[in-house]
Amino acid sequence: MAFTLPELPYPKTALQPHISPETLDFHYGKHHAGYVKKLNELVAGGKFENAKLEDVVKQAGPGAIFNNAAQIWNHTFYWNSMAPGAGGKPSGELDAAITKAFGSFEAFQKAFADACIGQFGSGWAWLVRKPDGSVAVEKTANAETPLTGANVPLLVCDVWEHAYYIDKRNDRAAYVASWWNLVNWKFAAENFAKAGKATAAAR
Ligand code: MN
């Protein structure tokens, strides 16, 4: 079975004024779709031809198959990390974990924005849940993803230039400042709760 491009969880007009339909035409319609096309070419006839995407990311090791598979996974996670009319603050257990780790929501926002802006070149900034149940901010380069390690991704911001060049030109900080208005805290809270249950079940 070929790898497929998951549908965007909202219309391309839905993230305005923060992210334009033109950005989504390119970012989703060209870049994300391109990784899917390329991965299908790379795995044809090989051991990953019928594998699950997550397993390809975890097992491929450095190289083109990993890069394209991880970029498919990371982008799908990124689309879900945003929602129209979202933003604001987290609530419940995730809010408590963020306050415990960073001191305040504002301090977390600063740490996350610093990770976004401080990532030299292409990459991603993540909020993750560590195996001990605490949360942390991570940045990864290029296609790298927490999925290959012990931490569970909760939320991601894509800081490749293709994520913001049409709307904000070279101003990554302006993109990140605008991005907070789209953050899907419901998705992050669900990921946090799911990771907690998985940890409890493994004990
Ligand atoms: Mn991207």
Image: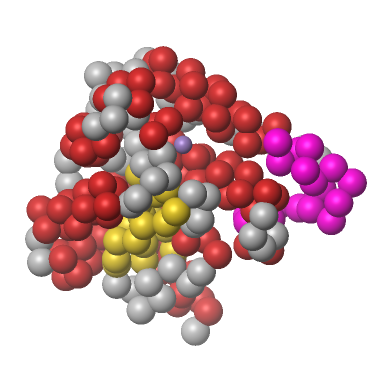
Look at the image and say whether residue 94 sits in the magenta stretch.
Answer: no
Q: Quadrant of residue 165?
A: top left
- Position of 119 compared to 46: left or right? left
Q: Is residue 31 above or below residue 188?
A: above
Per the rendered image, the range of residues in magenta is 38-57
Residue 90 x, y percent position in the rendering = 21, 50
From the viewer's perspective, is residue 21 above or below residue 155?
above
Q: Nearer the viewer, residue 31 or 82?
A: 31
Single out the residue that lies furthest toward the right: 45
Q: How many marks?
A: 0
User: Residue 150: percent from the left, percent from the top?
Assistant: 48, 72
Residue 84 quadrant:
top left
Position in image of residue 117 (x %, y %): 26, 47
Q: Is residue 52 visible?
A: yes
- Residue 40 falls in which quadrant of the image? top right
At x 37% / y 72%, what residue is drawn?
Answer: 130
Up the image or down, 137 lies above or below 18; here it is below
Taking the magenta stretch, the answer to whether it contains residue 50 is: yes
Tell me if I can see residue 181 in this picture.
Answer: no
Q: Looking at the image, which residue is at 71% across and 41% down? A: 39
Image location (x, y in percent) of residue 134: 29, 72
